Image (cartoon, helix red, strand yellow):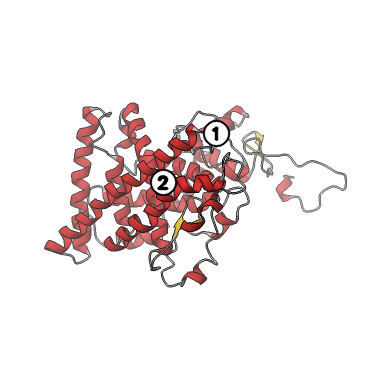
Amino acid sequence: MPFCNAINPPSKTFVKPLCVVCEDDSCGQHFGQYSCKACAAFFRRAVASKMFFECRFDKRCDISPGIRNICRYCRYQKCLDKGMIQSAVQAHRDNSVDKRFTGSPSSSSVNYNASGHADMRRLPQFFDGYVKFQHLRSTSFGMLAADSNSQSWDPGVIFRSLDLETLLKFIPRSTYSSAKKGCHMETSLVYDMIMEDHFSPFSSLHPDDRKELFNQFSVFFCNAEKSYNTYKAFGHIENNDKVMLADGGYVKLDEVYKYYVDSIDINADPQHLARIFVKCFTYIAKVVVPAMVHVGVDDYSMAAIYGLALFQDYNPDISAEAREIAYEIKDDILRDLHVYYRNQGLIDVELTTKVSKLMLLVPTMEHLGRLFRENFHLADLFCMLDVPRAYK
């Protein structure tokens, strides 16, 4: 009888086998090895759907209970290395799971489909990928190592009806180590999002072009998400002085040093680090978020921004072929935005102004990414902290 179904275990002491992949408690044998339900389901889906994964880092990612979702390549490779048997997977079981999943779209997807945007070329795809990313991020953060931040935050919630005192009961303070984990996980999830053809044709570009474009985009995305989540949490608060970070917690502008206290990733005085990075956090709270409030961004417009930021026609290090594709995609995005806002009732000058304001957010967020890169480079130069991989 499998260990997970045992009601009355034998009186003698025994050690419950661990999952050979993530070392969490196993639930019996699956595909030839002891594994937990999560890793067994992951292996079954990967084999049945013939998925192809890539590692964004050095192919040595840690696969442990709290962060087993960070890299699917390393997780799948560990399944194989530990002896899980591909031929034991029944493909039809995953097909039924996939049908159940796709048959129950999120409320955001339902609302979007009902809006009648069938004449769009790119944005529906981008939007669906972004909604899926948000769902996976929420699920994955909940599985990070015991961390009050990940348990308290729901990035899908907009707290505009709450006053600040009530709001802070739901959102805890961030710490550098947990935010670094969140950044790592976010980077892996967004790479999966764009490689799964939600941001087509990125996955079919030459590997050198993909690498160059993603290296720039990953930093843009992480900082844009900080800004967007700050907008959703604190955008309605006048003179807001708080910024949401990748672990779902916040940092206060006049207490940035607390973010760096008691962290195994910090090798310098927290006050010194605060003086270096406070400009970045201030830029989010005082420049980017007010600009988002002025535009009135939503998930759909953020998906458009991410499409523009991913396909960088101005990047000098991509091929001529990739640049031509980027030109075409940018044209399609602008056209789709006109359709989207026209369907919301905007016309003529109002519509043009709305799209223009949205486009101006892109260089604003790019500047934010440069600020963080420069400061992380300085901190890394003097070994002040362990830098997130996206910034290395």
Q: Amino acid at mark 2?
A: Cys
Residue at 57%, 57% in the rendered image: 151
**Distance of mark 1 from mark 2, alpha carbons?**
20 Å
Point out residue 118 in the picture as x, y percentages from the top left corner.
23, 55
Viewer-proximal residue among 119 and 31: 119
- Locate residue 196: give its quadrant: top left
Task: Give the quadrant of the C terminus.
Answer: top left
Residue 335 can be seen, yes or no: yes
Viewer-proximal residue among 139 and 290: 290
User: In the rendered view, would you say 388 is above or below 254?
Assistant: above
User: In the rendered view, would you say 134 is above or below 232?
Assistant: above
Label at residue 222: 2
Viewer-proximal residue among 368 and 36: 368
Which residue has dot 1 on it? 61
Point out residue 247 in the picture as x, y percentages from the top left corner.
51, 51
Q: Residue furthest left?
A: 348
Left-right relation of 16 to 284: right
- Locate residue 300: give its quadrant: bottom left
Left-right relation of 237 to 356: right
Q: Amino acid at mark 1?
A: Cys
Point out residue 219 in the picture as x, y percentages from the top left corner.
39, 41
Residue 220 can be seen, yes or no: no
